[in-house]
Amino acid sequence: MKKSFGANTLIFPTPVWCVGSYDTAGRPNIMTIAWGGICCSKPPAVTVSIRKSRYTYDNIINRGAYTVSVPDESHAAEADFFGIASGRKKDKFKAAGLTPVRSDIVDAPYVAEFPMVLECKLIHTFDIGAHTQFVGEIMDVKADESALNEDGKPDIEKIRPIVFSPDVSLYHTVGREIGNAFSIGKTLNSKDK
Amino acid sequence: MKKSFGANTLIFPTPVWCVGSYDTAGRPNIMTIAWGGICCSKPPAVTVSIRKSRYTYDNIINRGAYTVSVPDESHAAEADFFGIASGRKKDKFKAAGLTPVRSDIVDAPYVAEFPMVLECKLIHTFDIGAHTQFVGEIMDVKADESALNEDGKPDIEKIRPIVFSPDVSLYHTVGREIGNAFSIGKTLNSKDK
């Protein structure tokens, strides 16, 4: 039996991503979002949804760029803080003891200490309602050398990203490997009908 | 040191969600996506990105509706299969031995055996490039009674959703709880500056 929860932004999993931007004075800002995801393969693009009232909103509009830094589980408190505080009132990088790095590709900063970062050029802005969706073309992805697998690709078990559960507002780690995508379902595919 | 991976849809975590729709003949179809996320709180809305060539694309356009069923880790092979096979060629529900349930709210089916489902009314369609972004207003969220916490809310440790790693194409489970959102960062927020 399924229980109904009504019209609600309640689904698992959602990401914990930190959106970096510069304000008009050139000060780096960072905010945490869970409303976002990859939205296109070509051009490679990632979307983040932000309320108009947030400091980051005008920053992205003005600079036409943002970054997405992926916090690892050891920085869950810092990532949570980035979602609580406003860049209007304080330098969140300084308060968290983390380092803003100026992207050499887009006009936005990212978090040096976080293991993975996407540098994005704003290509679309869609008003949905309370949130505006920013679509950013992914110009580059960078990951810590120490978080790569034996093939030199980012390893989720070393990146250790955080999973957010909306509504119940909890953070979880990523667990064990289940299997290979586009592979473990092949047996079913070969079945007749 | 960070290594550069170029312009790529490479970020963690991304979801494994199964999008349900009806074709013109009224046959239920289901496909797995990882390009999507919550995109607005009011109206509550979830976005899924789908290529024009996919069978699901026309289904959603024609019916103005879709569902998002969240597979648990014990159905990883079925979810993977739903991303490999095409509904043009086979009845994927039947091949996987899973049950399509007609939503009583929107004109789309969902997967009975999956623990969580969102029923969505199509409200926007945005062409980004290779993928089109469908924005669905979440009309209802349903979850298995057996997957609720003691407060009667969906529990991610009982829903057991799957995490997808793009590029390296791996599925992972959700791991241990880290802490409460909008809470574990408060200590940093109270620090001066």
Image (cartoon, coloured by chain):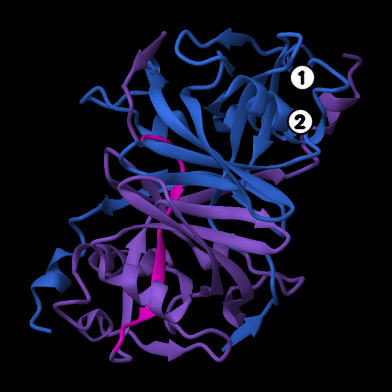
Chain colours: A blue, B purple
What SS does tag 1 mark? Answer: helix
Residue at which label 1 appears: A92
Q: Secondary structure at mark 2?
A: helix
x then y, percent, for residue A21: 64, 21
**In the image shown, does A126 or B14 lie closer to the viewer?**
A126
Q: Is residue A129 above or below residue B145?
A: above
Give the residues drawn in magenta, as a range: B10-24
Horizontal and vertical percent for residue B151? 77, 71
User: Considering depth in this image, is A117 or B25 the residue closer to the camera?
Assistant: B25
In the image, residue B162 lies at what x, y percent?
Answer: 42, 57
Residue B8 sits inside the magenta stretch: no
- Find residue A138 and report its image quarter: top left
Residue B113 is situated, as x and y percent measured from the top left of the image, at 42, 81
- Which quadrant: the C terminus of chain A? bottom left
Front in this rendered view, residue B159 or B48: B48
Tell me, yes or no, whether the highlighted magenta stretch contains residue B16: yes
Q: Is residue B80 left or right of residue B156?
A: left
**Which circle's residue, 1 or 2, is located before the other in the chain?**
2
Does residue B4 appear to the left or right of A14 in the view shown? left
Find out whether the residues at labels 1 and 2 contact each other: C-beta distance under 8 Å.
Answer: yes
Classify 10 Å Cα crowding around label 2: few (below 14), some (14-19), many (20 and above): many
Residue at 89%, 19% in the rendered image: B191
Residue B110 appears in the rendering: yes
Residue at image point 22% right, 76% down = B87
> Same chain, marks 1 and 2?
yes
Classify the position of the N terminus of chain A by image quarter. Answer: bottom right
Residue in the foreground of this view, choosing between B102 and A179? B102
Circle 2 sits on which residue? A81
Disc 1 to disc 2, how far (Cα)? 8 Å
Q: Amino acid at mark 2?
A: Phe
